[in-house]
Image (cartoon, grey):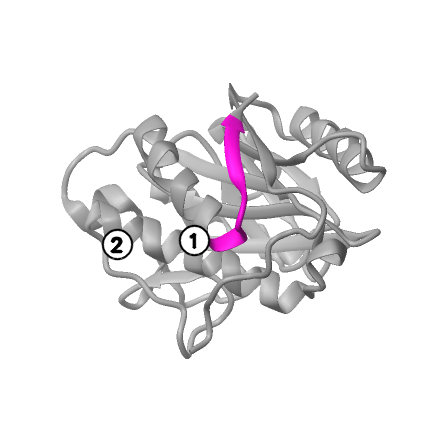
Amino acid sequence: MRTGSIQPSAKTTACTVLRPGRVAYDEALELQRTLHQEVAEGRRPETLLLLEHPHVFTLGRRGAGSDILADENRLLELGVEVRHTDRGGQATYHGPGQIVGYPILNLRSRRSGPLEYVRALERVIIDSLAEIGVSASSEDRPTGVWAGDAKIAAIGVKVSRGVTMHGFALNVDPDLSYFDCIIPCGMPDAEVTSIARELGRPVAVEVTMDKLTPHFERVFGVVASLG
């Protein structure tokens, strides 16, 4: 089976969960970098950031400008920024109605690698969706989580000094038309969906965050507390 659990940290089982609301991408990136340094130096517990971004297209290490299909005028009209970033993967969209999760975890103390970590993130999302009532999987699919033939969550990570950055984006109830302006994850024919579309009703981001956290605790072997 492709997804599974990951070994708990040998140093600590504490994990601080930060839920700062809607945060600009650049501001969240700086916060990640600060948290990453503090976790890597053992000066703070492992941390999970759960937030939303204003409209932004991000390009990972394998992304190219050609993955953005909208011209500058269209981007201005839509109010979308474009950012190049050092996560894995290609182009994706972040915006209101989407949970972006940035776990800052010590993989070195867990004796785990990036691939195992990504599979564990998939498991967190799949199990959370199952509780909500959405059947999803990652088996025999590109990295991420899929509801049928449509992608419902994207994953792109970075590991430096044995500590993770970046993470996942779960579509709760965003405006999916923004994905029409990019080639998501380098797959021009890929469909994109959301929890709200799968359930046929509105779904709240905050409620979905509440569902995610216990599954994150179980899969990663941590005890989470709000910071």
Q: Which residue is mark 2?
A: 130
> Which sits earlier in the primary sequence, circle 2 or circle 1?
1
- Determine contact: label 2, label 1, CB under 8 Å: no
Classify mark 1: residues with Cα within 10 Å, few (<14), some (14-19) or many (20+).
many
Percent coordinates x, y for residue 37 in the rendering: 82, 36
Is residue 220 found inside the magenta-colored segment of the image?
yes
Note whether 208 is above or below 60 in the view shown: above
Residues rendered magenta in the picture: 219-225
Residue 165 highlighted magenta (yes or no) = no
Secondary structure, mark 1, is helix
Work out which quarter of the rendered image holds the C terminus and state it.
top right
Q: Which mark is residue 143?
A: none
Does residue 54 appear in the picture of this structure? no
What amino acid type should be assigned to the residue bearing mark 1?
Val
3D distance between C-alphas at marks 2 and 1: 10 Å
Location of residue 140 in the rendering, given as x and y in whole percent from the top left corner: 41, 79
Q: Position of residue 15 (x, y in %)?
A: 59, 36
The answer to whether residue 202 is left or right of residue 224 is left
Give the residue number, with chain letter if any, for mark 1: 124
Q: From the image, which quarter does the N terminus lie in?
A: bottom left
Disc 2 is placed on an element classified as helix
As drawn, is 176 to the left or to the right of 99?
left
